[in-house]
Image: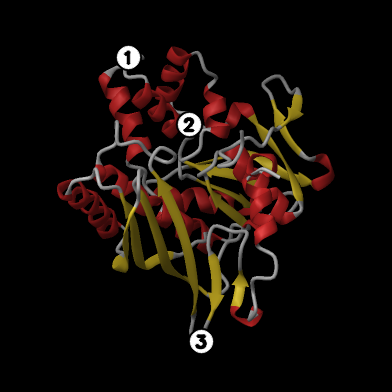
Amino acid sequence: MKLGELGEFALIDRLSRDLVHRPEEVVRGIGDDAAVLDFDGPRWLLFTTDMLVEGVHFSLDYASPAQVGIKTVAVNVSDIAAMGGWPAHGVVSLGLPPRLSVEEVEELYRGIRRAAKEYDLNIVGGDTVLSPERLVINVALLGFVEKGRAVCRSGARVGDLICVTGSLGKSAAGLYLCQHPEAGAGPGVAAYLKRAHLEPRAKLRSGQILSAAGVTAMDDVSDGLAAELREICRASGVGCRVRAADIPVDYRVREVAALAGRDPLDWAFSGGEDFELVFTIPPERVALVEERLAAAGEECRCIGEVIPAEKGMVLELPGGLCVPLEARGYDHFAP
């Protein structure tokens, strides 16, 4: 069987069997944004890793080495944010192609340092090897969360509301502009959206606020909103109904989508790399969450509700017509 026939997530399911030999130390293993490990003390340990490969996750044709460093740290910190925790220590491993100069590698690390300082993260080690063709960067992070406050994908319950922070589709629109500089977007619009793609920011403070406020499930929007909802529904054994009219899409994303002849909701649902937080919460707690996020300069919007699993994933279109919500998103091995 070819990898493309199986797909990324089915491959992970196959490979993750029989890997935990000391289950008493594992609160949450494979299947969430970060592993949650239990040791003595008032906190749980969070452990996550992400790899970025040139030509897959970034291109040096339009991203500077510093921007690649910023993005590499942010995507890992975003996994910690989605668990409601905070990062502490990280290691960075590099596969360096011989065409890169020393100055370019130093610039890459300037971006890593800048992002690490923003998130109060220590970089304490790593590895450096030769890569024949492409730049490869892997970061592994340790973080912490108060015991009992790790927010997993598996806690959503029927009747919970579904909410998302910020707005969606910015990264996909920024990627389009990076790849189509002739698109005709205004300089302010282009700069804003390109920055959203090239220099994403993890919603670390928002994740901590949401954890403390008692959200029931949470995921970061890395592979697209539809894919993240699928993960929450599958882990929680529920379905969802999402209202298209309530999906938060920035006016600049709509402007670029019009230039590209694209539906901005496609970018919101399947574009990915927005690194916003999608979460479920009992209705009576929504006002508290909105108040606390607003005090931190963040906003969220309710976009739907959790429904029984047998009803599936449903998208409610303007006018009330309901159609299946296709869980499209980034799959490394999809054809």
Residue at 25% across / 47% down in the picture?
A: 98
Which residue was labeled with disc 3? 40
For mark 3, give the secondary structure.
Answer: loop
Let me know if residue 231 appears in the view.
yes
Task: Count residues near mark 1 (Cα–Cα under 10 Å), then give few for <14, some for 14-19, many for 20+.
Answer: few
Residue 17, percent from left and from top: 70, 65
Q: Is residue 253 left or right of residue 98?
A: right
User: Mark 1 to mark 3: distance in Å?
Assistant: 57 Å
Secondary element under disc 1, as helix, strand or loop, is loop
Q: Earlier in the sequence, mark 3 or mark 2?
A: 3
Mark 1 or mark 3, earlier in chain: 3
- Residue at the extreme bottom of the image, as rendered: 40
Q: Which is more toward the observer, 42 or 23? A: 23
Q: What residue lies at 34% left-to-right and 46% top-to-bottom? A: 135
Question: Where is residue 83 drawn, in percent x and y?
Answer: 52, 61
Q: Which residue is mark 2?
A: 169
User: Which amino acid does the dot numbered 2 rest on?
Assistant: Gly
Q: Position of residue 152 (x, y in %)?
A: 60, 60
On screen, 316 above or below 18? above
Q: The residue tagged with tag 2: helix, strand or loop?
A: loop
